[in-house]
Image (cartoon, rainbow, N blue to C red):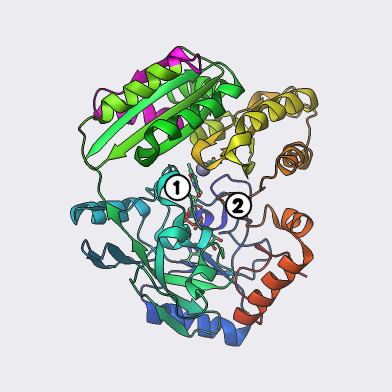
Amino acid sequence: MAGYVTDWRDLYRGRARCVLRPASVAEFADVMAYCHVHGIAVVPQGGNTGLAGAAVPDGSGQQVVVSTTRLRQIRSVDAVDMSIVAEAGITIAELQSAAGDAGALFPLSFAAEGSATLGGAVATNAGGTAAVRYGSARDLLLGVEVVLADGRVWNGLRTLHKDNAGYALRHLFAGSEGTLGIVTAAAMRLVPRPAGRAVAFTALADEAAVGAFWALLRARCAGAIRAAEYISGHGLALVMHEMGLRAPVARAAHHVLVELNAASADGLCDLLEGVLAEALEQGIITDAAVAQNEDQCAAFWRLREDQTEAQKRAGVNYKHDIAVPISRVGELLARCRAALAQRCPDLLVLPFGHLGDGNIHMNVVRPAALGAAPHPEEGEVAGVVHDIVAALGGTFSAEHGIGRTKTDLLETLRPAVELDLMRRIKAALDPAGLMNPGKVLRQE
Ligand code: FAD
Ligand code: MLT
Ligand code: ZN
């Protein structure tokens, strides 16, 4: 059972009474009805790539892991209605490929897409690298099929692009992290597949330039931006070292990867080269490389997408999945760098992430080489980061969810009335408290 009870970061090792892998909605309904009658707590699990510790059981050995990985049908793809209906255990990469075969694009994309599932993406409201253009999972969610805590099945698999009939119940399950029911299938929005793609990797000298570059990009290329991803100079050095990669530009303190997409390739490279020339002229960027073919596009993207894996290899990871207003990203980078250098000089500060959403992963690594040497605890480091985030009007949870790592933060930082509403929703859908207990909301 090891792979089902240990999270991706190897931070949480739980124990389970058993792992169940139902293969149909009817089997899921039977499992949930049985657990409901017998008072057994259930931990839903998809690809187990979540970064908030929410997909693995606690240490009691009393909880049951219910895996969706055998629920794998693509029920329909419709390039006229621009929708895809698929079961929870299909991976994000498989969905992208099915949409592509139909001539459309399923735009959700992130480094774990080869293992992360549709059910997991909905349940965490995953964001990723194209959220700046297409939104997070919730924005793509047209309908859901859910097995409720008592085993009843709600089929809300509508594929309408507008549906205002009553409360948008489907949205309750987006970001619910397995605490309200098991998503067995979802209807997702597709978008037209762009034919043109242009990717550049850039170097920037200081934090102020990061904000200025984003503002210029948006002013010149607004509708074409598919991604604008930030990577720190130290993060670039680490990924090159750990993964054996090469940088396409002169090394700097800050880097941004830009991808433009459009219906046609005509003029797209010119648009990108034009804005890069302007940024160079204004001193916003100091160097840039434009990918000349698909292999180079992939090589540029690896420098960004392998950040998480490289950091995992380098030591113990303290993750801060934060977002601030985009106008304040430069200030966030500068203030965190200074404060963390002062409070924990031995730790590596390796921010990267989704610049266009203001969602920077302000990750900190305690190098394996430090061994047992004294170091600040995770909570102390998090306190430094979250105080700055709060001062900048940001959030401590932008896309990975609350899971078990941030239940205390949620209790502390969200207003009492908001928490009360969340508890009432939880009690209405899961009165016995058997759905992923202790995740999102602290167990009373
Ligand atoms: P799991 O990890 O199995 O589960 C996550 C949560 O969803 C748990 O609470 C679980 O109980 C619940 N759950 C799973 N399936 C269901 C279901 N069918 N019904 C109800 N609840 C369910 N996330 C981002 O948002 N953006 C990123 O850019 C990103 N990049 C990543 C890069 C790497 C290298 C890694 C390892 C992770 C990354 N993640 C990212 C986090 C993670 O991949 C996403 O949260 C993903 O959506 C989780 O999917 P999963 O199938 O692995 O879910
Ligand atoms: C990513 O954007 O690659 C993941 O969300 C990041 C992480 O490792 O924190
Ligand atoms: Zn991310």
- Residue 281 x, y percent position in the rendering: 44, 13
Ligand 1: does it lie within 8 Å of the C-beta at label 2?
A: yes
In the image, 322 versus 185, the foreground residue is 322
The answer to whether any part of residue 247 appears in the image is no
Find disc 2 in the rendering and name its residue.
52
Above or below residue 341? Residue 127 is below
Tag 1: amino acid:
Ala
- How far apart marks 2 and 1 lie (CA) works out to 19 Å
The answer to whether any part of residue 355 appears in the image is yes
Quarter residue 324 falls in: top right
In the image, is 176 to the left or to the right of 393?
left
In the image, is 130 to the left or to the right of 366?
left
Above or below residue 161? Residue 32 is below
Q: Mark number for residue 131?
A: 1
Q: Is residue 233 magenta?
A: no
Disc 2 or 1, which lies upstream in sequence? 2
Q: Is residue 297 magenta?
A: yes
**Which residue range is magenta in the image?**
280-304
Quarter residue 143 falls in: bottom left
Tag 2: amino acid:
Ala
Q: Which residue is at a point 56% across and 51% down the rendered structure image?
A: 400
Q: Which residue is at a point 27% across and 35% down the rendered structure image?
A: 197
